[in-house]
Amino acid sequence: MAGLFDEVTETLFANKTVLEEEYEPDTILEREDEIEEYKDALKDVLFGRNPSNVMLYGKAGVGKTAVTTYVLDELQQATREREQADTLYVHRHNCNDDTVFSAVRALVNQLLPEDEKQFPKKGLSTADAREELYAQLERVGGTHLVVLDEIDHLAEADDLLYELPRARANGHLDAARIGVIGISNNYTFRNQLSSKVKDTLREEEISFSTYDATELRTILYDRAEKALVDDGYTDGAVGKAAALAAQDTGSARQAIDLLRKGGEIAEREDAATIEDDHIDRAREEVKRGRLRDKIADQSLHARHVLEAVAHIEHNGDTPVRTKDVMKTYQRIADERGDDPLTTLKSIQNHLSDLQMLGFLIRHEVNKGQSGGYYYTHELDMEPDVVFEACNELDKEDAV
Ligand SMILES: Nc1ncnc2c1ncn2[C@@H]1O[C@H](COP(=O)(O)OP(=O)(O)O)[C@@H](O)[C@H]1O
Ligand SMILES: [Mg+2]
């Protein structure tokens, strides 16, 4: 008997992982200068000396993590081959929504021998955790690079950035050396640091600019070649993904995502090649997804008000006055079994919030002689997007 999956073959994708988030590229393109600076900052490690501390700045998706992984892998390789170099240990930690305590605790846990109990979550202070960190570093010896990724999310990063680089100078470490690599998506993070920390970290700051379309095209071609079958993509598709991402964010992540999603759309339609049209639609899908998330963040009644305007827009009756939005809104709320809001003022408030969030456009209409005015509203997006989002959300609410 034929199996359900028998006819499924990989069509466009020869190796799709190459386009997934967790893929670590072994070639970094278009970042020669940054890599050179990085190399310079860390070269002392090769001779058994203290590493400099490094701060990386740049928007999301511009290669900070990828470059760091590449450079540190290379460095680790080099230290194995060099007589003078101490053993190099790299500790990576993502600081997303962390406290200094949990960051230090995570580092301690990375260092503890396997059979040792994890550092307790509660009951001990950050100073205790730091002391344990130093004890473990001393036990292991060698050179340690601590990578604190997305450090701008770390509340009170200042303390950590002050203490760790000085651990040796302050007599906490003797057998071990430590260097800190901080990565921030946010340039203004620098201004939040105290001047004493800035002084230490001024040693090495590397900033990553956003990519332009040409750079993104180079990065994308390399990925496309590895990820897709021969003739699986057109130059137009790669150029389109690069151009859209350059225009929008300058992020390689966005460009790669567009290519992958474009491939998925092409595959769904049994197309043999990814064309620029697939990329356009991929972007459209992403945009819809984002809008849907934004709609999902709204309160129930705000959603009903938005849906009301979408219905009116769909019927071609916009711009529409608040009192007419209210009628449609009340019908929708009734249909869904939600007690409708009853004052014009509350609808007015929702409309004005929705306008501020970019869902609606509002016009002020003067009544002429009498000197009064009123507002009319129209939707600032495709009504279908709202219907789809509200439908899905209603289904979720019903569960
Ligand atoms: N110069 C580059 N060459 C190859 N791939 C890159 C380059 N820059 C970024 N990427 C890829 O783009 C994505 C986002 O990069 P990442 O390093 O995670 O950005 P950041 O850490 O700055 O947010 C990753 O998949 C990464 O592999
Ligand atoms: Mg990153």
Image (tube, rainbow, N blue to C red):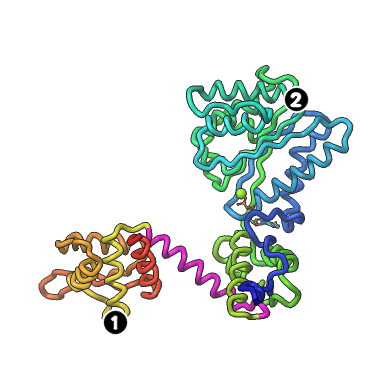
Work out whether residue 363 or residue 8 is closer to the camera in this orientation and state it: 8
The answer to whether any part of residue 217 appears in the image is: yes
Q: Looking at the image, which residue sits at the far left?
A: 370
* Residue 386 location, quadrant: bottom left
Q: Looking at the image, is mark 1 or mark 2 earlier in the sequence? A: 2
- Residue at image x 58%, y 76%? 268
Kindly state the secondary structure of the residue where label 1 is placed.
loop
Q: How far apart are marks 1 and 2 (CA)?
A: 73 Å
The residue sitting at 57% across, 44% down in the picture is 150
Q: Residue under circle 2?
A: 141
**Residue at 69% over, 71% down:** 10
Tell me the quarter of the picture where residue 199 sits.
top right
Look at the image and say whether residue 346 sits in the magenta stretch. no
- Asked if the magenta segment contains residue 279, the reply would be yes
What is the x, y in percent for residue 344? 16, 64
Which stretch appears magenta? 272-296
259 above or below 253? Answer: below
> Could you tell whether 264 is left or right of 122 in the image?
right
The residue wearing badge 1 is 315
Quarter containing ligand 1?
bottom right
Question: Where in the figure is residue 114, as x and y percent of width and height?
Answer: 68, 30
Relative depth, front residue between 239 and 341: 341
Q: Is mark 1 within 8 Å of ligand 1?
A: no
Tell which residue pokes out farthest to the front in this image.
Answer: 1
Q: How crowded is mark 1: few (under 14 residues within 10 Å), some or many (20 or more)?
A: few
**Which residue appears at 42% of the width and 60% of the height?**
293
Query: In which quadrant will I find the C terminus?
Result: bottom left
Q: Are marks 1 and 2 in contact (CB under 8 Å)?
A: no
Q: Which mark is residue 46?
A: none
Q: Which amino acid lies under the numbered mark 1 shown in the image of this protein?
A: Asn
Quadrant (top left/top right/bottom left/bottom right) for the N terminus:
bottom right
Amino acid type at image mark 2: Gly
